[in-house]
Image (tube, rainbow, N blue to C red):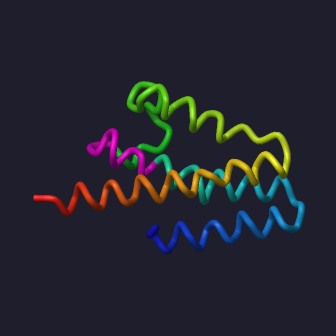
């Protein structure tokens, strides 16, 4: 299960990938995949400042999260971006974890 807005955003990334439009696909990926993922990860790692986006990213997030996000932001070509769409799986896992934590007594 994932947020409906996030799911809709992924269609725009996929559309540009299928059209072979690298610049548009990267722009949509950063805006509609990475940015929401960072906000969601912020809810987990810095709940008091989850909406800070990339501000203080280096110091507020664990180094493994920082490294993985940094790698996911650097895109070589369409095939690389398609492979990095694994960020959607990470979003799903994090979303589920936050729901579980917030609904536990």
Identified at 31% across, 55% down, the residue is 98
- Given the current orientation, which residue lies at the most extreme right position? 20
- The magenta segment is 39-49
Taking 47 as reference, is 99 above or below it? Answer: below
The number of numbered badges drawn on the structure is 0
Is 57 in the magenta? no
- Is 89 left or right of 60, judged from the image as shown? right
Q: Please provide percent x and percent y for residue 88.
A: 57, 57
- Is 103 left or right of 46, judged from the image as shown? left
Identified at 81% across, 62% down, the residue is 17
Identified at 85% across, 45% down, the residue is 77
Is 43 in the magenta? yes
Identified at 32% across, 40% down, the residue is 46
Q: Please provide percent x and percent y for residue 61.
A: 41, 32
Taking 97 as reference, is 45 above or below it? Answer: above
Q: Please provide percent x and percent y for residue 3.
A: 45, 69
Q: Nearer the viewer, residue 79 or 31?
A: 79
Q: Quadrant of the N terminus?
A: bottom left
Q: Quadrant of the C terminus?
A: bottom left
- Given the current orientation, which residue lies at the most extreme left position? 105
Magenta span dominant secondary structure: helix
Q: Please provide percent x and percent y for residue 69.
A: 57, 38
Q: Nearer the viewer, residue 21 or 103?
A: 103
Q: Nearer the viewer, residue 34 or 99?
A: 99
């Amino acid at each position: 299960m994932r947020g409906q807005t996030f799911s809709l955003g992924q269609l725009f990334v996929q559309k540009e990938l299928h059209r072979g439009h690298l610049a548009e696909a990267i722009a949509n990926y950063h805006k509609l995949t990475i940015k929401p993922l960072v906000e969601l990860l912020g809810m987990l790692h810095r709940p008091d400042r989850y909406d800070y986006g990339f501000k203080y990213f280096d110091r507020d997030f664990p180094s493994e999260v920082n490294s993985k996000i940094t790698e996911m932001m650097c895109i070589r070509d369409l095939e690389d971006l398609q492979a990095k769409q694994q960020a959607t799986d990470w979003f799903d896992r994090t979303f589920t974890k936050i729901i579980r934590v917030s609904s536990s007594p």
